[in-house]
C-alpha cells in the first residue's frame, strides 16, 4: 500500500479498521475526538457499529459486552475519561477479554488541561482500576509506529485474552505523518470458543465473569492471570535502544519525548559527548533487561518525561542501584526542549548534579 | 402418569442461594419459562447484576455475562450491537438499576436498545444487608435509614416505570408483582409480552417486579407478601404503562 499522510488520531481509526475492528464505543473528549469522529464516518461503510455512549463508564461496559460476545472492539478517550473507564477495565481484565483502549493523554490532575502530557503512566502501568491485573501498554513515538501498534495490539489482545492500551501523549494524536497500513507478524490466535453467541443447544452456556466468591478459586484465578502476565513479559517486550554499550550517559524516554531526546543526542554527539538512548515501546511489560546492557562506565541515566517523574520509578527498578538515576520533566503542557536535555546531560558529565 | 409441572429447561440444576420466601426465585422461573416458551433460550444472552441476583449467571441455562454494579444495560448494549440476532436481557435490582445504574438504563431505553430488562424492586439493598434504596418507602426503616426514610432528607422513592414510560425508545413498560398465583400468572404474561417486543425488533422493554426481601425487611415470608401488598402497591401501582399498539 502507498503511504498516505494522516493525523495520528485518524490513523488509529484506519489501523483499527484494517485490523478488523468493527465496533467502537466512546464519549467525546479533547484531544482525541478526531478518532470517534473518524469511526462514526468510516465504520458504517464497512458494516461496523460506532456508538456514542452516555459516558465513558457506559462506553467501556459496552466494550465489555461486545468483547464478551466475541467482537474485535475498541474505545478511546483522554485522561479524565480514562479515569472513568477504570471500573470497566478492571472487569475486562478480570474476565480476560480482549479489547483495545486508547488514551491520548492530556494534563492533570483533575480537569487539568487539554494540552499534551504523559501524566497517566502510573495509571496505565500500575492498574488504575482495582485488583492485581495488568494491561499491555504500547507507547508509539511516531504515527507509523502508532498504526503498527494498533494493528498488532488487537492480535496481542486476542492471543492473551487481555486488554491492550495505546498510550499516546497528546502530540502524537495531532501530528500528521505519512503512514502505511502493514500486516503485523503472524500470530497463532486461539479460537474465541468462550464467547457468548447463544448455546444453540449445542454446548454448555458460556459465562463472562470476574466473580469468584471462594477464596481458593479467586486465588487460583489470580495465579492463572499471573502466569499469563509472565508469558507476556517473556514474549512481548518491545524496546529501541541506541549506543548503550558505549555511552557515558543514557537517556530513557518514551513516546514523542524520545524524538526530542534524539535531537539532543545528535547535537551532543557533534560536540563529542557519547550519549545513548533506551526507548521503551512497551511500558508494560517494561524492558527492564535492556538496562543490563548498559556499559559499566556509564555515569548515569537521565529519564526525560512530560510529567513530574513517573517512568523514572521503572528506570530505578531496572538499574538496581548500579547507576545514578536523574530526572528531567516538564508538565502542564510544557514540553522538554533539546536544550534543556543537553544542559542536563552536560551537568551529569561534569558531575554537577 | 401425566406430567402436570416440569422444571423449565431455562434454569440450570444449580441450587439457588436465595433466602426462604424471597421472590427472586419465582421471577427467575418466570423469566426462564418465557425464554423457553418463546423459543429463544438457545440464542439468549443474559446479563446479571450486582445485588442478590449476582449469581444469576449460574441459574439461567443460557450464555451469561456478569456486569459491574448498574452497568448491565451498557453491557447488554455492547452484546446486542455485536449480535443483533440473539436475544439479550438484563436482570437487575433496584439499587443496581434505580441508583448507581440510572444513566445506563435511561440511555439504553432512550436509544431504543433492543434488549429486555427485568427489574426487581424490593425497596431495599438486599445483598449488602438492608441499606436504604432509592425505592425505599417514606418511613420505611433501613440500616442506613434507622429512623425511617425521611422525605425532607432524601426525597421520595423513585418510580422507574413511570419515568421510563415517558421515553420514546421504551416500547414496553409494565409493573407487576408475584405475591399470589394470579399475580404470578400476570407477571409471566407481561414478561413474555416484553420479550416479544425485542423479538419483533420494536425496541426497549422493561418489566418491574415488586418483590419481597423478608430477610432485610425483618418479616416472615407471608408477612412480607402482605407488607408488599399493603405498602408498596399503593405507591407503586401495578399495570401496563406502555405497549406497542400492535401487541395490544
Ligand atoms: C461499585 C460498587 N458499589 C457498591 C457495591 C456493593 N453492593 C453490592 S450489591 C449492592 C446493592 C444491591 O441492591 P439491589 O440492586 O437493590 O439488589 P438486591 O440485592 O436488593 O436484589 C451494593 C451497593 C458494589 N458491588 N460495587
Ligand atoms: S437478602 Fe432479600 S433479596 Fe436477597 S436473597 Fe435474601 S430475601 Fe432475597
Ligand atoms: Mg433491592
Image: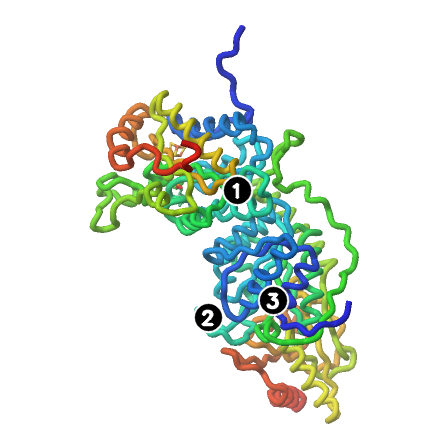
Can you identify the residue that label 3 sits on? A167
Query: Eyeballing the image, is A339 above or below A315?
Result: below
- What is the spatial separation of the Cα atoms under label 3 and label 1, in whole angstroms? 28 Å
Q: Nearer the viewer, mark 2 or mark 3?
A: 3
Secondary structure of the residue carrying tag 2 is: loop
Asked if the beta carbon under badge 3 is closer than 8 A to the nearest atom of ligand 1, the reply is: no
Can you identify the residue that label 2 sits on? A109
Residue B195 percent location from the top left of the image: 48, 34
Farthest residue to the front: give it: B246
Image point 58% across, 38% down: which residue?
A: B86
Q: Nearer the viewer, residue A283 or B77?
A: B77
Residue A313 percent location from the top left of the image: 59, 70
Which chain is mark 2 on?
A
Question: Which corner quadrant of the image does residue A173 belong to?
Answer: bottom right
Residue A221 percent location from the top left of the image: 61, 44
Query: Eyeballing the image, is B203 above or below B227?
Result: below
Secondary structure of the residue carrying tag 3 is: strand
- Left-right relation of A239 to A309: right
Question: Which corner quadrant of the image does residue A32 belong to?
Answer: bottom right
Can you identify the residue that label 1 sits on? B66
Tell me the quarter of the image containing the N terminus of chain B: top right
Query: Eyeballing the image, is A28 above or below A23?
Result: below
Amino acid at each position: 500500500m502507498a503511504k498516505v499522510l494522516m493525523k495520528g488520531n485518524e490513523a488509529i481509526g484506519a489501523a483499527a479498521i484494517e485490523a478488523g475492528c468493527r465496533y467502537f464505543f466512546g464519549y467525546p473528549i479533547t484531544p482525541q475526538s478526531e478518532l470517534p469522529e473518524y469511526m462514526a464516518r468510516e465504520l458504517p461503510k464497512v458494516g461496523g457499529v460506532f456508538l456514542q455512549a452516555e459516558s465513558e463508564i457506559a462506553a467501556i461496559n459496552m466494550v465489555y459486552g461486545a468483547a464478551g460476545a466475541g467482537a474485535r472492539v475498541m474505545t478511546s478517550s483522554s485522561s479524565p475519561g480514562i479515569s472513568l473507564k477504570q471500573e470497566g477495565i478492571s472487569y475486562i481484565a478480570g474476565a480476560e477479554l480482549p479489547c483495545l483502549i486508547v488514551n491520548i493523554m492530556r494534563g492533570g490532575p483533575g480537569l487539568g488541561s487539554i494540552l499534551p502530557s504523559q501524566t497517566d503512566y502510573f495509571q496505565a502501568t500500575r492498574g488504575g482500576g482495582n485488583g492485581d491485573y495488568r494491561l499491555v501498554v504500547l507507547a508509539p513515538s511516531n504515527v507509523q509506529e502508532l498504526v503498527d501498534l494498533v494493528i498488532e495490539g488487537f492480535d496481542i489482545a486476542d492471543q492473551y485474552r487481555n486488554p491492550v492500551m495505546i498510550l499516546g501523549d497528546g502530540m502524537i494524536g495531532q501530528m500528521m505523518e505519512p503512514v502505511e497500513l502493514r500486516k503485523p507478524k503472524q500470530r497463532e490466535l486461539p479460537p474465541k470458543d468462550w464467547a457468548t453467541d447463544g448455546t444453540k443447544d449445542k454446548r454448555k452456556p458460556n459465562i463472562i465473569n470476574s466473580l469468584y466468591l471462594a477464596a481458593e478459586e479467586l486465588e487460583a484465578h489470580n495465579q492463572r492471570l499471573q502466569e499469563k502476565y509472565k508469558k507476556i513479559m517473556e514474549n512481548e517486550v518491545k524496546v529501541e535502544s541506541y549506543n548503550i554499550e558505549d555511552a557515558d550517559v543514557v537517556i530513557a524516554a518514551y513516546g514523542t519525548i524520545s524524538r526530542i531526546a534524539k535531537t539532543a543526542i545528535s547535537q551532543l554527539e557533534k560536540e563529542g559527548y557519547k550519549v545513548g538512548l533506551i526507548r521503551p515501546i512497551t511500558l508494560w511489560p517494561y524492558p527492564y533487561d535492556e538496562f543490563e546492557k548498559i556499559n559499566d562506565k556509564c555515569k548515569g541515566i537521565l529519564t526525560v518525561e512530560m510529567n513530574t517523574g513517573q517512568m523514572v520509578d521503572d528506570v530505578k527498578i531496572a538499574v538496581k542501584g548500579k547507576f545514578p538515576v536523574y530526572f528531567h520533566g516538564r508538565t502542564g503542557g510544557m514540553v522538554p526542549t533539546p536544550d534543556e536535555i543537553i544542559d542536563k546531560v552536560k551537568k551529569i558529565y561534569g558531575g554537577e548534579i | 402418569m401425566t406430567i402436570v409441572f416440569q422444571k423449565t429447561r431455562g434454569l440450570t440444576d444449580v441450587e439457588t442461594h436465595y433466602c426462604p420466601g424471597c421472590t427472586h426465585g419465582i421471577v427467575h422461573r418466570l423469566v426462564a419459562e418465557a425464554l423457553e416458551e418463546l423459543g429463544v433460550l438457545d440464542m439468549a444472552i443474559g446479563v446479571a447484576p450486582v445485588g442478590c441476583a449476582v449469581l444469576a449467571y449460574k441459574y439461567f441455562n443460557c450464555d451469561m455475562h456478569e456486569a459491574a454494579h448498574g452497568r448491565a444495560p451498557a453491557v447488554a448494549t455492547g452484546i446486542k450491537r455485536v449480535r443483533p440476532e440473539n436475544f439479550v436481557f438484563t436482570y437487575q435490582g433496584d439499587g443496581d438499576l434505580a441508583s448507581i445504574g440510572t444513566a445506563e438504563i435511561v440511555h439504553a431505553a432512550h436509544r431504543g436498545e433492543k434488549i429486555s430488562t427485568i427489574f426487581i424492586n424490593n425497596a431495599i439493598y438486599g445483598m449488602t444487608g438492608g441499606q436504604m434504596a432509592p425505592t425505599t418507602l417514606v418511613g420505611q426503616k433501613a440500616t442506613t435509614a434507622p429512623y425511617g426514610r425521611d422525605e425532607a432528607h432524601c426525597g421520595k422513592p423513585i418510580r422507574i416505570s413511570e419515568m421510563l414510560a415517558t421515553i420514546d425508545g421504551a416500547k414496553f413498560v409494565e409493573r407487576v408483582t408475584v405475591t399470589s398465583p394470579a399475580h404470578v400468572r400476570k407477571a409471566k404474561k407481561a414478561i413474555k409480552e416484553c420479550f416479544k417486543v425485542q423479538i419483533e425488533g420494536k425496541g426497549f422493554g422493561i418489566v418491574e417486579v415488586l418483590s419481597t426481601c423478608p430477610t432485610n425487611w425483618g418479616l416472615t415470608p407471608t408477612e412480607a407478601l402482605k407488607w408488599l401488598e399493603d405498602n408498596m402497591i399503593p405507591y407503586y401501582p401495578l399495570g401496563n404503562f406502555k405497549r406497542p399498539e400492535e401487541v395490544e
